[in-house]
Image (cartoon, coloured by chain):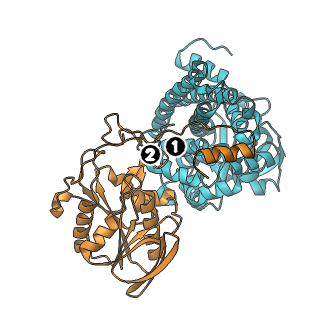
Chain colours: A orange, B cyan
Amino acid sequence: MKVLVPVKRVIDYNVKVRVKSDGSGVDLANVKMSMNPFDEIAVEEAIRLKEAGKAEEVVAVSIGVKQSQETLRTALAMGADRAILIVAADDVHTDIEPLAVAKILKAVIDEEAPGLVLCGKQAIDNDMNATGQMLAALTGWSQGTFASELDIEGDSATVTREVDGGLQTIKIKMPAIVSVDLRLNEPRYASLPNIMKAKKKPLDEKTAADYGVDTAPRLEIVKTSEPETRKAGEIVGSVDELVAKLKEAGAL
Amino acid sequence: MQDHENDEFQDIRDAVRALCAEFPDEYHRKIDEERTYPEAFVDALTRAGWMAALIPEEYGGSGLGLTEAAVIMEEINRAGGNSGACHGQMYNMNTLVRHGSEEQRRRILPRLASGELRLQSMGVTEPTTGTDTTQLKTTAVKKGDKYVVNGQKVWISRVQHSDLMILLARTTPLSEVKKKSEGLSIFLVDIKEALQSGMTMRPIPNMVNHETNELFFDNLEIPEENLIGEEGKGFKYILTGLNAERTLIAAECIGDGYWFTDRVVKYVSERNVFGRAIGQNQGVQFPIAEAYIEIEAANLMCRKASRLYDAGQPCGAEANMAKYLAAKASWEAANSCLQFHGGFGFACEYDVERKFRETRLYQVAPISTNLILSYVAEHVLDLPRSF
């Protein structure tokens, strides 16, 4: 079985996000970028499937600016076998919308014929949480979202899903799209020999046009704003005073 | 603080940071408090291939240069660790790779790459001859197929946590050589074996958790196949290690510098006194900004030194100047970090005092600031010899 893992280049989770002064989005100029953490979990799971003998090949794919090849090299250094970069934007601020991404991924699936797609449940930049589901709709494959456990046996997969209020376990038919949640695994860090090997692994470069997909945005961002800053607290002298204040604020 | 934009070594940085993240402040604090060796940390670095970065690929390493090694060391210190525990293997490596015989490379390098052996010690300094290296008193006299070593070394680090050491000794008496830098030779010493047969070790307790020792040689026999390169040319060879050491220590200071500025910026932005963050005061801002500027400048010189080193070009002046600038910058950064943490800077649980002690060492070791100044005055500016 071949496993396809889509990975997205996003602003590093350690970076303090700054909104552009015109409110059109987040400032990404000269900012550290990394692989979306949920996608790292997907890559890790795919490599574990390969190590367990349940997958033969792990193919990482990224759609975005040319610099996404760094993200793909990270996936290769973790243990993916080869990578496909689909250049769909010139400006780092261009975010390709989930439907366009899903359409391109559908075309990649038609070409690569994987038995499983493992993707992050959402990207930490726009939190859309849509690509996996849209891809399942386009392919007509089964979907298992928010996976915190995954077990593949023959032509079916058992997926434990993190749903509101608990866990739900479902059995789905393969091929399938599985979107992964935080607790599925802990991704490994790349070793130096693997970083060196990754530099020699194949990385194909294509464009969105090669797949005949129009990536022009359908959504318009009206405004981006920073969260309100936390207001100063107040020190109270006793528990009674605390309770009174909480009541006053309508919290009790 | 905003991270630097991605540089060409981002893959290395990210991977070293991810590894270091598994060894948080508490780990390094406990190691320091107990005065032990960060065995688990060095093991993890070895397993992930970082300690074999400089070993050519055909011997099982990754074949990287000193530039990448410097990035690795910088990241370790930037993450709160202390590369002093493991940088020896990095700076010794090229002495063996560049000057060792093919037989020695085949015999030793794959075992260093796998982590089976460590080459972490370099025996140069002696009690009466510090930087005046050519005057060293330790002798190695050829007898049959062996060299017999007698003498004494001091400040020899990581001997207790290394298997091999590169030793510099005089093989031709000073009176019989044309130039005083001739007649010195370097040897590969099997430490465990030597400790059974003529070498004794006395640890030196010190201000930081740095394992360093006095060594005494009483008729220690070294097989002739452990002579590195040609007899009598050891001084030239040892410079390969010394220039690497200075460049790597510069990188470590730069890592320390970023650690200090990151920590102090965070602290002064959050610490409120008289109703406002102390970081709002220019009296607080300027020393931090100044240290940061100096760290960035030192980084450029460090990169210049490592690039020259990797190209096989002379880099003595650059390696020295990089170490000078970086050690000074990290010290300034350490000082402002401690100062603006106030009393908390002295509390062990903030780690500032530990890093402060650790980075202070590099104004003294491996060469003191004054000797760098006199090197530059004499060898770069052609001023008259002062000693």
Q: Is residue B305 left or right of residue A214?
A: right
User: Circle 1: is it few (<14), some (14-19), or many (20+) Cα within 10 Å?
Assistant: many
Helix or strand or loop: what does disc 2 sit on?
Answer: loop
Say what secondary structure mark 1 lies in. helix
Residue drawn at x 59%, y 50% is: A251
Query: Which label is found at residue B71?
Result: 1
Where residue A129 sits: x, y (%)?
37, 62
How far across and how far down the image is residue B310, in percent?
Answer: 47, 40
Q: Relative to the observer, which residue lies in front, A94 or B310? A: A94
For this rendering, which residue is in front, B21 or A26?
A: A26
Given contact means CB atoms under 8 Å apart, are the residues at marks 1 and 2 in contact? yes
Q: Quadrant of residue B171?
A: top right
Residue B82 shows in this picture: no
Q: Residue at x 67, y 45 (%)?
A: A244
In the rendered image, which quarter is residue A138 located in? Answer: bottom left
- Residue denoted by label 2: B9
Residue lying furthest top: B384
Please give left or right for residue B257 compared with residue A38 in the image: right
Does residue B358 appear anywhere in the picture?
Answer: yes
Q: Nearer the viewer, residue B328 or A208?
A: A208
Q: Name which of mark 1 and mark 2 comes first in the sequence.
A: 2
Task: Indicate the quadrant containing the C terminus of chain B: top left, top right, bottom left or bottom right.
Answer: top right
Q: Compared with residue B151, is residue A181 higher up or lower down, i.e. above or below?
A: below
